Image (tube, rainbow, N blue to C red):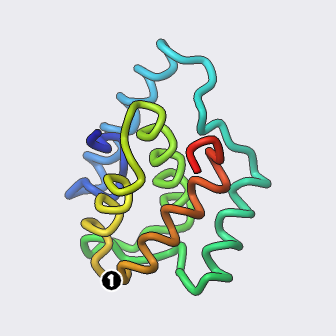
Amino acid sequence: MSSHNRLRGYESLEMAIIATGAAGLVAAGIVCAGPASADQNQDNQYIATLTNAGIPASYATRGMNWDTSVAIKNARATCDNLAHGSTFNAEAADLGKYNPQLTPGQVATETSVAISVYCPQYR
């Protein structure tokens, strides 16, 4: 399944904001709480685990410097996509496509960490 709600695939911040807002409005009307309803402890655990694995959660994508909040949103989007039928391999491929600075091992690790922290039912 395509990850249309991810920020890393948009050419401009404006389009990412528009798409994210639209996806949020649709989701709010359909689902009250999805599998990626994370709290601050999960966010902290996600960033700490990435950091301990040597993967910077703040990385450059398409020439724009993202902060850790985007990495967190992308991790949550991974869980949303898995809930809608995506696979680990599809999610890892998507992450790698938009983050060519990550090695295949880092991509697999980041995808695994997202699943472990935010949606362990998909491990």
Looking at the image, which residue sits at the far left?
Answer: 11
Point 56% across, 44% down: residue = 122
Residue at the front extreme of this rendering: 123
**Helix, strand or loop under label 1:** loop
Question: Residue 89: x percent and y percent?
Answer: 35, 57
Where residue 50 sits: x, y (%)? 61, 74
Give the number of callouts: 1
Residue in the picture at 60% in, 18% down: 32
Estimate the x, y position of residue 106 in percent, counting from the top left: 45, 78
Q: Is 66 or 32 nearer to us in this picture?
A: 32
The answer to whether 46 is drawn above or below residue 75 in the figure is below
Q: What is the quadrant of residue 81 in the picture?
A: top left
Report the residue at 48% width, 33% height from top. Answer: 83
Foreground residue, 25 or 45? 45
Quick check: 48 left or right of 61? right
Residue matched to label 1 = 101
Give the percent coordinates (x, y) of residue 42.
73, 53
Identity of the residue drawn at 36% across and 48% down: 6
Dot 1 amino acid type? Gln
Which residue is nearer to you in this view: 14 or 44?
Answer: 44
Task: Judge whether 1 appears above or below 43 on screen.
Answer: above
Give the answer, above or below, for where 29 lies relative to 4: above
Q: Is residue 98 above or below residue 2?
A: below
10 Å neighbourhood of mark 1: few (<14), some, or many (≥20)? few
